[in-house]
Image (cartoon, rainbow, N blue to C red):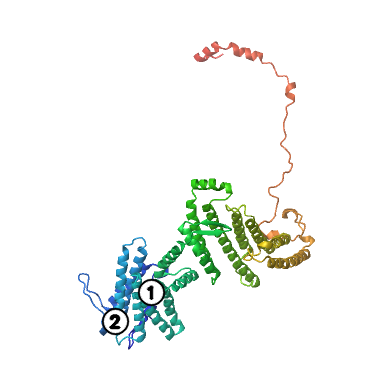
Amino acid sequence: MYYCQSALTQITVLQIVKESQQQHGLRHGDFQRYRGYCSRRLRRLRKTLNFKMGNRHKFTGKKVTEEILSDNRYLLLILMDAERAWSYAMQLKQEANTEPRKRFHLLSRLRKAVKHAEELERLCESNRVDAKTKLEAQAYMAYLTGMLRFEHQEWKAAMEAFNKCKTIYEKLANAFTEEQAVLYNQRVEEISPNIRYCAYNIGDQSAMNELMQMRLRSGGTEGLLAEKLEALITQTRAKQAATMSEVEWRGRTVPVKIDKVRIFLLGLADNEAAIVQAENEETKERLFESLLSECRDAIQAVREDLKPDQKQREHSLENDSGKVSNIQYLHSYLTYIKLSTAIRRNESMAKSLQKALLQQQRSEEDGKRTARPQDLIRLYDIILQNLVELTQLPGLEEDKNFQKEIGLKTLVYKAYRCFFIAQSYVLVKKWSEALVLYERVLKYARQVQSGAGAYTNSLKELPDVQDLITQVNAEKYSLQAAAILDANDTQETESPSQVKDGKPLSERFETFCLDPSLVSKQVSLVHFPPGFQPIPCKPLFFDLALNHVAFPPLEDKVEQKAKSGLTGYIKGIFGFKS
């Protein structure tokens, strides 16, 4: 229960607010739904308490006083009023992104919420309310006041209000059990970024670093601070970008005139540091995606400047020296960053899949299959494709050191790709194919070791091929043993009665044979379609005596017919008979 009747009135303000928000829309950011819930609950409470504001024809205002606080549902009335106003303000905040005029309405509703919170705090000062409810009402009031001052950009007042709220919730968390303290600690974590943001705007430069580290660790803040923090980081980097005019890569310095590219290059080191310090794979994956998205935006900004006529003009000016234009070289640099980041992301995913595959091999009792060698093969295929694209970047075709470095990396990933292809063949007991692929892995690994001399530093981040060689040698011995055992099992179980001669069942009724295919879907019963067989044809009749037969003469009959022409016809008409 959220509230109860006792000698002292009490309500658990934060618990009521949090559970109502999670159950009625705020889990998905639907403030309009939550506002509708608050309105319906207010109507139910007023009807239950018979505390209606007049009727349909006339409004009669009523106020909650200390005298009627024996029922704590009156405090709940004021709390729902404040929540309804706050949720409407947050709804308007979402809509104000496209309709700036709604910001005035937003501030009005926040002031209304603060007014209701002040009334709740005033009523809780009564002796009829217990101490815990008084503290929660004060913290709730301080929270809404801080949000209002935050929107007005009154940083000092907002910071004081948030600090007061934080202090109260920390004391409440320490005073109760761990289960009850969870909500209070969550609220403290929610308002901590707001306090740091206010401190930064007041003049504390160290707060900015804390905010950026918090954003990089968690992938971004939520709620009131999210948009402001993103704008602040972009603004800070833009100020730093004003002093950045060029970048050096592989011995060549190119000017950077596009602001979006400057901002991306300034934040590149921070993003990479955050990826290295990521606590888990999910956070690391999210940071990789964020970095790739920013890199694609920067590349798009450079690509818009690569117009055909401008590119041809710059090429015509610089073709004599054999160099590509500065803007084209900058595009190649950004593409290199994008492809390298994609390779690192896929390699990180491959490592996590290898761990899952190893754990699965150790405990095969679960019936679930979490990872397969085929999944790793696909990742290494993508990495190899990215390496091919790196060798084709404009401006780097003649860079022999770069091409040699990419060639060595390609051999490393080819070795790992062959290794997992061999692992997939082992699973289906194709021993010969797997053994050949293991030999190919050793060939690639030895090529890397022989050519790595001057490129040892650039290959440090790659998987160690020596570990791969050790693993392949162990797998080869296991493979040979498994192949021998499998061959022995086949010879022991195979007998003459099991050897089939390819005849269907209809032709070997007299011979006993163990044929497992008889219970499968491809059983051989008869030859179909049947073969051709010779059959007797229908006899033919030839009349050979016809040429030697003498027929009787018919001349006399033919003459009679010739005579009886017109005369016979006339006799026939008049009925005369001959």
Horizontal side, residue 350 vs residue 47: left or right = right
Q: Quadrant of the N terminus?
A: bottom left
Identity of the residue drawn at 40% across and 69% down:
225
Q: Position of residue 168 (x, y in %)?
A: 39, 82
Is there any visible trace of residue 428 in the rendered image?
no
| Residue placed under numbered mark 1 in the picture | 20
Q: Residue furthest left?
A: 58
Mark 1 element type? helix
Query: Nearest the camera: 522 or 154?
Result: 154
Q: Is residue 183 above or below residue 474?
A: below
User: Which residue in the rendered view is the most extreme toward the bottom?
Assistant: 7
Looking at the picture, which amino acid does disc 2 mark? Arg
Q: Residue at x 73, y 22 (%)?
A: 547
| Amino acid of disc 1 | Ser
Q: Secondary structure at mark 2?
A: helix
The residue tagged 2 is 122
Q: Earlier in the sequence, mark 1 or mark 2?
A: 1
The quadrant in which residue 272 appears is bottom right
**Res 247 seen here:** yes
User: 68 and 233: which one is in front?
Assistant: 233
